Image: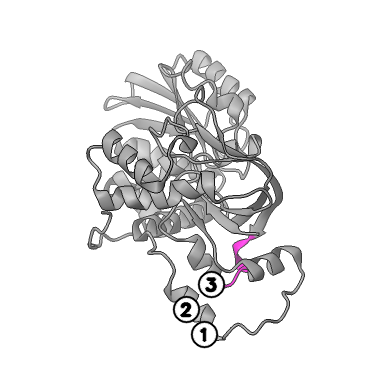
Amino acid sequence: MAIWLCRAGKHGEYENKFFEENRIYCTWEGLNASLKEFSDRSELHDFFMFEREDIKPKTATNWVSQVWPFAYEMKKGDWVMLPSKVKPVIHIGKIIGDYTFDKEATDPFYHYREVDWFKKGVPKSAFEQDILYSLGAFLTICRIKQEERIKSIVTGVKPEKTNTPILEEQDEIEDIVQRDIELDAFDNIKDLLIRKFKGHGMAKVVASILRAKGFVTYVSPEGPDKGVDILAAQGSLGFDSPKLCVQVKSTDNPVDRPTLDQLIGSMSNFKADYGLLVSWSGFKSSVINETASQFFKVRFWTHKEIVEEFLENYEKLDDEIKLEIPLKRIWVINNAD
């Protein structure tokens, strides 16, 4: 039995979809052909090079090394580990379905496998550091080496003693795929942000971001908010359009449809032009399915958009927020290709 790392998007943006549908997806944008059509890795490599003229051969090779196993190496009974981007936990499932290609699906959800999520929310602290390093690899899909120790942690059954040399574990650590430093920094900022500003504090952060973008804001006092946390508008006094109603949720649960309906009602009551629905833990499919129909009225932010806007507008944020989340710029070598 193999154990695989499979991410739900770079920033966990597809995490709720994976759980609601009991699946894992190979979320490569533009990969709209069945992987079973490729007879070997070189054909898949050529596909990437043809479809994406901007990528380099080394990048295409890296992509093939992750995509190919999804169809040809993962097996029923294998485990999959999904590190959460919302909470410091790891979700574990068992693959129960064969590789499936759905040509009618929306991009990037053409490729999937059915999964039984039998162990959700295992704290990251339960795993040793070298396992966490493996889960932090600069890859979306890869096989995790420390299978016996992971199974022992999850099941509570100690692994049988073997004659494996003691140095093997160190060899594994040194053999771990290069980590994504930028993603690590993003995650560290994200974790600190929710730790410092969970609850009503997140509304203050979003309001500060909006002010940095040129809005005048009113933040509802802590307590029942009647469907709106922030009112925002342009102009020196906040009398100009666009006028926004903003609802902010920083709980561990994804937002459902009634919350969206409540925001739409508030937009009407306050005569707002647009709405902004902010949910740290993302949205249930009932909300995501409304993205197109609400495109000209409502925008949706998850923790990904909050952190991106936080970083983009950091210099203009309130001083009290910057004191809680002190950041500095650094330069690193770009080894993306």
- From the viewer's perspective, tell me whether residue 91 is left or right of residue 31: right
* Residue under the point 57% across and 45% down: 199
Q: Give the range drawn in magenta.
A: 123-129
Classed neighbour count for the residue bearing mark 2: other residues with Cα under 10 Å, few (<14), some (14–19), many (≥20): few
> Under tag 1, what secondary structure?
helix
Query: Which quadrant holds the N terminus?
Result: bottom right
Res 326 → quadrant: bottom left
Residues marked 2 and 1 touching at CB (< 8 Å)? yes
The image position of residue 268, as x and y in percent, is 51, 13
Whether residue 226 is visible, yes or no, is: no
Q: Is mark 2 on a helix, strand or loop?
A: helix
Residue at which label 2 appears: 171
User: How is the structure coloured here?
Assistant: one colour
Q: Name the residue under label 3.
A: 129
The amino acid beneath tag 1 is Leu
Q: In which quarter of the image is residue 181?
A: bottom left
- Please give the label number shown on residue 167: 1
The C terminus lies in which quarter of the figure? bottom left
* Front position in the image: 293 or 75: 75
Q: Which of marks 2 and 3 is nearer the N terminus?
A: 3
Q: Where is residue 41 in the image (x, y as percent from the top left)?
A: 39, 47
